[in-house]
Image (spheres, helix red, strand yellow):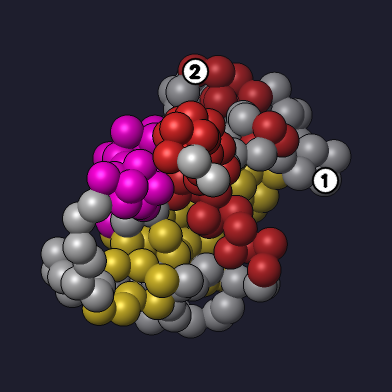
Amino acid sequence: MHLRSLLLFVPVATALLYACGDTGPDPADADVILEGGVTDETFVAMSSSLDQAKPTSDPAKAATLDMPVDGAVLPRATAPVFTWHIGATVQIERSPGRRWAGLGLLPAPAEAWTPLRELFGPIRAASAHGTPFNGTGTYLVFSTDTDPKLVRAFTGVTTYTPSQAAWGKMTGAGKQITLTLVSALFEQDRVVQGGGPFAGSIIKFTVAP
């Protein structure tokens, strides 16, 4: 291939590579509320891990709900604050000399800079939808017997206060609501090896008339 033809090919190939790297969330999950520093990419990783394996039971790493308690009747006037704790949060070593390969952390080999590597190298931060998330992410699913996705939220903190719209869905359900918690440990928007997902608390509550 002539050099001129190669140079014409480079921009097209680069665009294709970057487009393929930006997977984005499934449209079916567009209603999931993201809070506490998590990004679209964090939730895609969480969703993918749940598709691959059923959450494991590990009390030391599970998201355990503190409030409200199972069977609670919550006042309608004000949205409650759902709070929980993680049994034992694993601390991850953060080092600039490590990078992702699959689900594990492997040493990054030395790499020489070349103009073509700048074009074809790893996808840069500009393609991300926010600062990569590190830490424990918790997925909350509020459901009823007729609506398995009444309200869904994914957060990087250990509290969740429903917005007016979300609380309106719960108060309007008119029946008992089940809350299920699932957590996982993330590094740079990826579920770490052995980092979950972990099955957490499952409680039922109702909203007072």
- Residue type (three-letter) at the residue carrying disc 2: Gln
Query: Does the magenta-highlighted stretch encompass residue 200?
Result: no
Whichever of callouts 1 and 2 sits on the residue coming sooner in the sequence is: 1
Residue depicted at 32% across the width and 33% down the height? 126
Front residue of this view, candidates 105 and 201:
105
Residue depicted at 68% across the width and 62% down the height? 51
Task: Decide if residue 196 is on the left or right side of residue 160.
Answer: right
Give the number of the disc on residue 145. Answer: 1
Q: CA distance from mark 1 to mark 2?
A: 22 Å
Task: Decide if residue 172 is on the left or right side of residue 37.
Answer: right
From which residue to which does the magenta span run?
Answer: 115-134
Helix, strand or loop status at disc 2? helix
Helix, strand or loop status at disc 1? loop
> Compared with residue 181, is residue 68 higher up or lower down, i.e. above or below?
above
- Residue type (three-letter) at the residue carrying disc 1: Asp
* Crowding near the residue tagged with mark 1, few <14, some 14–19, many ≥20 C-alpha atoms within 10 Å: few
Task: Name, please, the residue furthest toward the right.
Answer: 146
Front residue of this view, candidates 18 and 165:
18
Residue depicted at 29% across the width and 67% down the height? 99
Quadrant holding the C terminus: top right
Give the number of the disc on residue 51. Answer: none
> Compared with residue 139, is residue 161 higher up or lower down, i.e. above or below?
above
Front residue of this view, candidates 206 and 1:
1
Task: Decide if residue 77 is on the left or right side of residue 38.
Answer: right
Q: Which residue is mark 2?
A: 164
* Position in image of residue 25 (x %, y %): 59, 39
* Position in image of residue 60 (x %, y %): 38, 81
